[in-house]
Image (cartoon, rainbow, N blue to C red):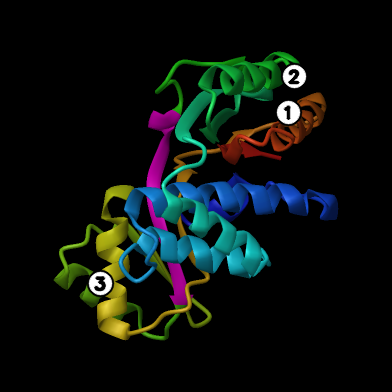
Amino acid sequence: MGRAYQNRKVSMAKTSDAKAKVYSKYGREIYVVAKAGGVDPAGNLALRGLIERAKKDQVPTHVIEKAMDKAKGGGGEDFAPARYEGYGPGSCMVIIDCLTDNPNRTFGDVRLCFTKTKCKIGTQGAVSHMFDHAAILAFNHADEDAVLEALLAADVDVTDIESDDGKVTVFTPHADYFKAKQALLDAFGEIDFDVDEIQFLPKSATPISGDDVVLFEKFLDMLSELDDVQNVYHDAQF
């Protein structure tokens, strides 16, 4: 897999004036994760990792607390995940993850991004089979073998592990995320994860150039304007 994940996940914070969108994105996701798995980060590893990521992205504490308070109340919006797949300029492959309280609106908005940039939205599963749905955990550690041993002892399916400049990066199937993270915490205590996410990693790359790059950047910009869009993954290689 290598370090492709660092370049294939599109940031929704390309400019300083996008901070509000970043706060909204995290607030929505924290609310959904806390409502589904409980508001105690100690017992909800997904929530714990999400809060840590939010803090690293400089999301204010009051934004995090507001989302947690909404989840405690049990009311509020009823967000549900929605995933769209398709082909961008130059036949590159794209996956778009959303959280929405109105699936019809979100589908229409995302489809418009495709059609206005000469892209083609596909059916579910159209391109996801060309990506690995992987959990990625990266943290400072000097002994890759010790990390691997701890994971294997916990019966974690490790698909790849890298060690570079004192940092270990672990890749596992997304279904093993909780098991892998708990095994690392049990073996090494508190860990400050540099990466703690589930992502789609492309199995290959699709080179694009010229006008296709311009169209693809417009496509990504349009998606970044949609509040419901949480993450965009692709296999385009500029």
Q: Are marks 2 and 3 in contact (CB under 8 Å)?
A: no
Q: Is residue 26 magenta?
A: no
Q: CA distance from mark 2 to mark 3?
A: 44 Å
Q: Which residue is mark 3?
A: 183
Main secondary-structure element of the magenta-colored stretch = strand
Disc 3 versus disc 1: distance between alpha carbons? 40 Å
Region rendered in magenta: 128-139
Q: Nearer the viewer, mark 2 or mark 3?
A: 3
Name the residue rendered at 45%, 46% in the picture: 32
Circle 3 crowding by C-alpha within 10 Å: few under 14, some 14–19, many from 20 = many
Residue 178: x, y in percent?
A: 29, 60
The circle drawn on residue 117 is 2
- For the residue pair 36 and 54, the one nearer the viewer reads as 36
Amino acid type for the residue under numbered disc 2: Thr
- Whether the residues at callouts 1 and 2 have beta carbons within 8 Å, the answer is yes
Measuring 61% from the left and 15% from the top, which residue is drawn there?
120
- Residue matched to label 1: 219
Name the kind of residue labelled 3 in the image. Answer: Ala
10 relative to 74 in the view: left or right: right
Q: Amino acid at mark 1?
A: Phe
Location of residue 141 by image quarter: bottom left
Give SS at disc 3.
helix
Neighbourhood count class around disc 1 (C-alpha, 10 Å): few under 14, some 14–19, many 20 upward: many
In the rendered view, tell whether residue 132 sits above or below residue 167. above
Q: Is residue 132 magenta?
A: yes
Q: Is residue 50 above or below residue 82?
A: below
Q: Position of residue 168 (x, y in %)?
A: 43, 74
Relative horizontal placement of residue 174, taking residue 93 as reference (left or right): left
Tell me if I can see residue 114 in this picture: yes
The picture quadrant where one finds residue 137 is: bottom left
